[in-house]
Image: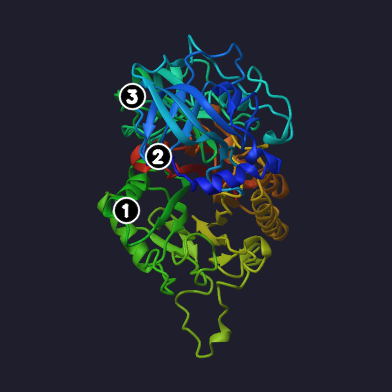
Amino acid sequence: MHGLRWLPVAVTAALSVALLPASAAQAAPRVVRIHNIQGAAHLSPLNGFAVARVPGVVTAVTANGFWMQDPRPDRSAATSEGVFVFTRDRPRAAVGDAVRVDGRVSEFRPGGGASGGLTRTEIDATATTVDAHGKPPPALVLGAGGLRPPGVVDHGLGNVERGGAFDTRRDALDFYEALEGMRIELRDAVAAGPSRDGELPVLPSRGAGAKPRTARGGVLLRDGDANPERVILDDALAPLPGMDVGDRLPGANAGVLDYSYGDYKLLLTATPRRAAGGLAREATRAQRPGELAVATAGLAGLNPDAPAARFDAAARDIVDGLRSPDLVAVSGLGDNSGADDDGTVADDQSVAQLITAISAAGGPPYDWRSVDPRDNADGGRKGANDRVGFLFRTDRGLSFVDRPSLADPVPDDPPARPDPAVTPVRAVPRGGAAGLTLSPGRIAPGDAAWAGARKPIAGELTWRGRRIIVVANQWFPRTGDDQPLFGRSQPPSQPTQWRRDAQARVVAGFVNSVRKVDARARVIVAGDLGDRGTSAPVRTLAQGAGLVDLPAELPAGDRYTAVTGGNAEDLDHILLSPSLRRNRHEFDVVHRSAEFADRAGDRDPTVVRIAVTGR
């Protein structure tokens, strides 16, 4: 069952006792209530201690335990009245039973001791007595007309489990901790993100009070705002329907509030009814005569082993959504053997299947340029060899400058032709403008910034006789090393950000080398930069190279290409040099992937149409 992953009780007990004096394990059992166990903190004041005859009413049951709630709560809003009881095997107690529990208090951390997530307070039961049968206590309503979380996570600096003020009125992290294990009800919830991996982010009360909202019904992620209005539903106790952004769950739906893997999650005890919101996939307008259309598209490891439907969806994005742009900076195209770690790095079969799908969708003929990586040298899934590249059409005046020329004979002496996987591309004067020594060519592939990461490539193209340099990117992604928004480290640390910042400096340095050769050079940097426009890496690139990040020109409600846990953010970018920025242009994020359950995790494509003028 999703979201409920347990360590052996011996391990959880050992982890708990390690936080307390050794004498705690030998102390006599304490007769306490649930709020005494939970305490007004993120760790139980009784962690590691034996407890006896703890009363409660069972609110939900799972394969190795149950949740119970005290029917006689105290008056403190800072102490939860619910707790999970770990029984190892299927418990005999049923929902509504009044029980008394003997056991030992522990703190279970999903993901292990090194995880950045918080813990779940538990009782590792040694005995459970059923005193009566009845009904579970009423649920607390979360949202309009009930409890409302504070708008921010504000716990100060450092580890929230090691101290600091505990204030449920000011800090959303403390607010949800004080509800851990309790029965919670949502009314008229609306999906803020698509269903994915058994989870669904929603906003209670049709999103009342949540902000800032996207133009299509989601909620935007901003610096310093974790959007605590979101509630993550989990299918651990009951199946959830597939949902797109804007779909609704009418009426009241109740469950128990749990914590796992970086988020507080509401485990509904019955499958809710879905009401479709009718969200439609977007399509941009077609480029006009004289406009160059340059787009981004993330293919998430697309390879010949993928279902035909994935190729069809990618082709529809390009043909229907982007209206067949002239150039697409592609990220995440896999090699011919997919995830098989067999030494394959070539991508011609992946490319052929994609181009065929585009043609079947009614699109024009496309061509492809990329640089095959060294096997397993560019990060990502082992054996997949995902790479960036250029998909382009040549029927509207765009030409790719191949250097070395594809028409040149391959020399008998291999060293005479550089290995494009390891040879850095450089900017050089060509005909009074900036050109490239290699096209396509990798930018500083030996730089430590790209170790274990996908290397960006630069391509030299001409648009109706005007030279353009385009850089396709897929920077180092966020990983499990980054602290979760609702984790024990506040504010969350981002140990992977230095990688993207270093990569930004390398790309900015390359752009500056092009503009040093020709101050009026037309340069486009595009692709998956893995961070929002307000982040340090994207600012480093834009400011360091004198580029303009086009998503910043959009209204805030349209400025997102990804939806993660219900948070909408702009992770894919197109940046223009001043010479192109001055030309009339129009940028668009085409929302057709990230908000839909059948494409959950995919990125929305982007496109800019530029009326290229001048020499």
Element at label 1: helix
Q: Is residue 415 above or below residue 489?
A: below
Q: Is residue 98 above or below residue 158?
A: above
Q: Residue at x 55, y 31 (%)?
A: 554
Q: Residue furthest left?
A: 360
The earlier-in-sequence mark between 3 and 1 is: 3
The x, y position of residue 259, in whole percent, is 51, 34
Under mark 2, the amino acid is Asn
Q: Residue furthest top?
A: 145
Q: Nearer the viewer, residue 472 or 386?
A: 386
Q: Quadrant of residue 35?
A: top right
Q: How many numbered badges does the structure rendering display?
A: 3
Report the Cα–Cα distance between label 3 and label 1. Answer: 27 Å
Which residue is labeled 1 in the image?
311
Which residue is labeled 2 in the image?
64
Q: Residue at x 27, y 49 (%)?
A: 361
Please name which of the two marks, 3 or 2, marks the residue nearer to the observer.
2
Which residue is labeled 3 in the image?
277
